[in-house]
Amino acid sequence: MMKIYTIKDIAAMAGVSVTTVSRVLNHRPDVNSATREKVEQIIRDCHFVGNTNARGLKQGNEVIGVVIRGRSNPFLSSLAEAILERADNVPDTFITEYIDERADEFSTALRMTRQNHVKGLIFVGSLIDERVEAIRSLDLPMVFTTVNAESASLSRASSVAVDDRNMGRLVAEELLDCGHRNIAVFGSNPVAGDSLAMRFQGFCDAFADRGLSYDRSMFRETRFSFEAGYNVARTFFSERPGATALFAMSDTVAVGAIRALKDLGKDVPGDVSIVGFDGVDIGRFTLPRLTTVEQPVDEIARRSVNLLLDMMEKGAAPRHILVEASFRRRESVAPCHRV
């Protein structure tokens, strides 16, 4: 009988990590050409189709599905790769599906369960809203990573996240303490039931604590990519030159904004202070280095996988865990010098 190969088999034969094979399978650009060619040749030789639909799996094999909502967000990609690294010691086969941030992760999960014998799910970068009803009937343990899913009241769902509301408050306090009042916020839907909405709520809480009211006309909804951050910042700061600070709810948006402000002839932080969120590596190398809220990627990945395994193997009850984020003060924030 023909041997059925898994992603772990391909990684072992290529002498690379599972995450590298996942990057090749998902056509990620951050793999050098020689490694990519080697992995792809082994995939062809083994007739391995890939992990997005698991056609390379034997019929009846059980798998764990990982849905990553946000192809262009390096933080979510890093987190997904950390989950796969953690899963390298797990006997189950993990299959991943990267989708656009505006795609529906729950319909994706339903499709995965129809195509495969899925025994558990991990959602990375999910949005908790009315769409969650689509998976309410799924009798599967699942973990929501980076978003607190307690409000969804799913009977078999756990979650791992930072305290987004508290960290949003901390960002606002930092900027307010530096004298900033005209502060832009770039994020996603501010009234959705996700981690980003919680960041915005916490941001507004800090204003209310000081008897201030945040001007919501300073908020802009954006996709989370370098290009989107650049475009929204270039338009916003051209139209609102009085803004002295920016809270970007993703480091990718913050990095794009730094470039846009440079092209507009503005100095960061002399003219505009910027705070990001996530703690991706590139923030340590931007000019200036980016002040940000750093999420503990390895801890989130470890806890997410362990929660799922506990529910699958031990019948453990769902849990909702908050992990500690860290505020990293770097060079992109300075006192406001404008009245």
Image (cartoon, rainbow, N blue to C red):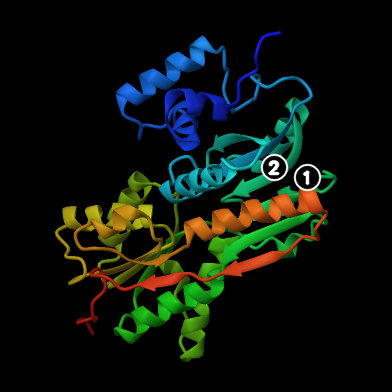
Q: Nearer the viewer, residue 105 or 67?
A: 67
Badge 2, how many Cα within 10 Å: few under 14, some, many 20+?
some
Instruction: Check the image and name the residue furthest to the left.
Output: 265
Residue that label 2 marks: 106
Instruction: Check the image and name the residue furthest to the top.
Output: 1
Image quadrant holding the C terminus, namely bottom left
Image quadrant holding the N terminus, namely top right
Residue depicted at x 53% and y 62%: 196
Question: Residue 51 is drawn in which quadrant?
Answer: top right
Residue 334 higher or lower than 85, as above or below: below
Q: Nearer the viewer, residue 145 or 229?
A: 145
Left or right? Give the position of 307 relative to 213: right
Q: Are marks 1 and 2 in contact (CB under 8 Å)?
A: yes
Residue 150, how many percent across, how many down? 72, 64
Residue that label 1 marks: 135
Residue 290 visible to the viewer? yes
- Disc 1 element: helix
Left or right? Give the position of 336 relative to 35: left
Q: Nearer the viewer, residue 105 or 23?
A: 23
Residue depicted at x 56% and y 40%: 88
Badge 1, how many Cα within 10 Å: few under 14, some, many 20+?
some
Residue depicted at x 69% and y 56%: 307
Residue 230, how many percent across, how many down? 30, 50
- Point out the tag, 1 or 2, that comes first from the N-terminus: 2
Q: Nearer the viewer, residue 273 or 2?
A: 2
Residue 217 higher or lower than 281, as above or below: below
Left or right? Give the position of 121 relative to 221: right
Left or right? Give the position of 149 relative to 332: right
Q: Amino acid at mark 1?
A: Ile
Question: Residue 139 is drawn in which quadrant?
Answer: top right
